[in-house]
Amino acid sequence: GCASTPVEREVPADGSASAFVLNRSEFGITLYIEGSAHRYPLGFVDAMSSARFRVPGEMVLAGGSFSLVAEGRGIGPDYVSDPFVIQPGYIANWRLPDNDVHVR
């Protein structure tokens, strides 16, 4: 039956994904995710800390490539990640200040 099929990952019913940001810089950043259609605010990540955010399903399901954007609000530098593709249930991991992004 179906039980023998390994479950790769749990896909949320709402089609959402996640963004996990590890901010090793000395500045807090305001985080956005940018898709083909628009920029969506995710939240704030303090200096020397990490946070995980939900990326809404309607954005994920719209497809295309995405970038994570961090704004230093005039105190620290701004960052834009390399473009990536994400699917429901996946996590985009972004490390700052070295600007390393990978999706798993």
Image: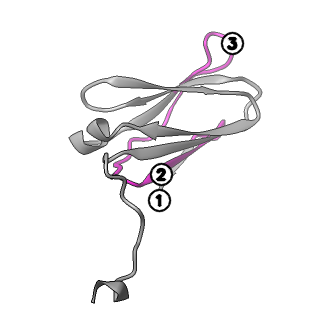
Per the rendered image, the range of residues in magenta is 70-99
Q: Position of residue 26 (x, y in %)?
A: 77, 27
| Magenta portion: prevailing SS class | loop
Residue 74, position as x, y percentages in the image: 63, 9
- Tell me where residue 83 sits by quadrant: top left
Q: Which of 47 and 56 is in front in this view?
A: 56
C-alpha span from label 3 to label 1: 31 Å
Q: Name the residue under label 3.
A: 75
Compared to residue 49, the image places residue 102 above or below, namely: below
Q: Where is residue 43 shown, x and y percent of the image? A: 55, 26
Q: Residue at 74% x, 28% y: name it.
A: 47
**Residue 56 in view, yes or no:** yes
Estimate how packed mark 3 is, as few (under 14), some (14 to 19) or many (20 or more) residues with alpha carbons within 10 Å: few
Instruction: Please name the residue that numbered disc 1 is placed on.
Output: 104
**Looking at the image, is mark 3 or mark 1 earlier in the sequence?**
3
Q: In this view, does 3 lie above or below 58?
A: below
| Element type at mark 3 | loop
Mark 2 crowd level (few <14, some 14–19, many ≥20, 10 Å Cα): many
Which residue is denoted by mark 2 in the rendering? 91
Q: Which amino acid does label 1 sit on?
A: Arg
Under tag 2, what secondary structure? Answer: strand
Q: Is residue 98 magenta?
A: yes
* Marks 2,1: beta carbons within 8 A: yes
Chain-order first, disc 3 or disc 2: 3
| Left or right: 48, with 96 as reference point | right
Give the amino acid type for the residue marked by disc 2 in the picture: Ile
Judge by depth and name the residue closer to the eye, 94 or 51.
51
Q: In this view, does 42 lie to the left or right of 49?
A: left
Q: Nearer the viewer, mark 3 or mark 2?
A: 2
Residue 29 drawn in magenta: no
- The secondary structure type at the circle numbered 1 is loop
